[in-house]
Amino acid sequence: MRAELARHAPAYIALALALLFFPAVASDFFLTQIGGYSMIFGMMALSLMILAGYGGMVSLAQITVAGVAGYSVAIFGINATGVMGFAWAWWVVAPLAIALAAIASALIGWIAVRTDGIYTIMITLAIATATYYFTQQNAELFNGHSGFSGLRAPEFWGVVWRDPKPFYYLCLGAAVLSYLAVLYAARSTFGLTLQAIRDNPRRMRAVGYDVTAHKVFAWALSGIIAGIAGVLLVWFNGRISPGTIGVGAAINVLIIAVIGGLKHPIGPFIGALVVVLMQTFAIDIVGADRFNTLIGLVFLVIVFVSPDGLLGLWGRVKPHLQQQPLR
């Protein structure tokens, strides 16, 4: 990780300064609807990138894992619906929600790692769909179709963390920590082993590695990041319902990850920013009825031009730019 940071130090410094001072020039709308929202979905896509990029396991259940954390916040914390709501302190609820998300992710992984390729995608899609209908039809525990509302971000140190600037910095801190953790894990013994398992699981099993255990642990790690994103998403929206964890949302996470690129942890955040900007501004131009078509076309063009997403496209263009003679 040190070599990575040293090699790209100027770019990292410029990006860090831009992100830190963004609130000084941005409106509250851009801080939350663009900045905060992009970082939340970037973390969800990052949790998918761990599985797909390093482990070769494509999951459509990351929004489900985030939903476990979100519903945990609603059930164990305070909500305004009169259903459940144990009113536990936020500093108990938030870590518990993330832990439950990690456990749920590990359980999903324990089921999914017994398959490969398209079968993994179908199993995780089935789990995501089943979870959606389970929350929708269970009014006693999840308040059915309406879900939970009145979910508030914490207030401590004299700061209301749902206010635009504090919430932006909260999301930024969580995104940076998640990014650095993944960067470190990818270069650790576990990360290198996971990538070797992705490339040749039979050989790794033959030399004595527990392939299943490594894969399940990767699912647990991805669940921690998805759980953090789920908690932040609930604090952002102030509510959660079955629509939050629907199949459409699950596919959006995959689209974000693929558009940005699955070969580096920065890719999911690039993809999230692009998709959030399109959702915010392009929908007014093409209309809600045609917006999904636009997203699909952009997705197809990017994948056709660069299977590695925007990050891969930049990697192909950058050498040509560096070779251009100065005038």
Image (cartoon, rainbow, N blue to C red):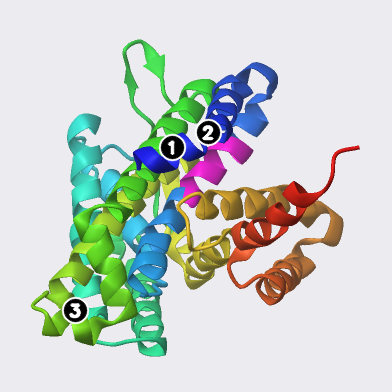
The magenta span reads 33-42
Residue at the location (51% across, 67% down)? Answer: 254
Residue 20: image quadrant is top right
The picture places residue 291, in percent across and down from the top left corner, at: 74, 65
| Residue 35 part of the magenta-drawn span | yes
Query: Which label belongs to residue 12?
Result: 2
What crowding class fits label 1: few (fewer than 14 Cα within 10 Å), some (14-19), or many (20 or more)? Answer: some
Q: Are marks 2 and 1 in contact (CB under 8 Å)?
A: yes
Callout 1 amino acid = Leu
Circle 1 is placed at which residue position? 5
Residue at the location (8% across, 78% down)? Answer: 208
Find numbered disc 1 in the image and state the secondary structure of the residue it sits on. Answer: helix
Determine the CA span between mark 3 and mark 2: 35 Å
Callout 2 amino acid = Tyr
The picture places residue 279, in percent across and down from the top left corner, at: 69, 53
Circle 3 is placed at which residue position? 204
Q: Earlier in the sequence, mark 2 or mark 1?
A: 1
What crowding class fits label 3: few (fewer than 14 Cα within 10 Å), some (14-19), or many (20 or more)? Answer: some
Q: Return the residue found at the far right.
A: 327
Residue at the location (27% across, 62% down)? Answer: 192
The answer to whether residue 196 is left or right of residue 7 is left
Mark in the foreground, 2 or 1: 1
Determine the CA span between mark 2 and mark 1: 7 Å
Find numbered disc 3 in the image and state the secondary structure of the residue it sits on. Answer: helix
Q: Earlier in the sequence, mark 3 or mark 1?
A: 1
Quick one: quadrant of the C terminus?
A: top right
Determine the CA span between mark 3 and mark 1: 30 Å
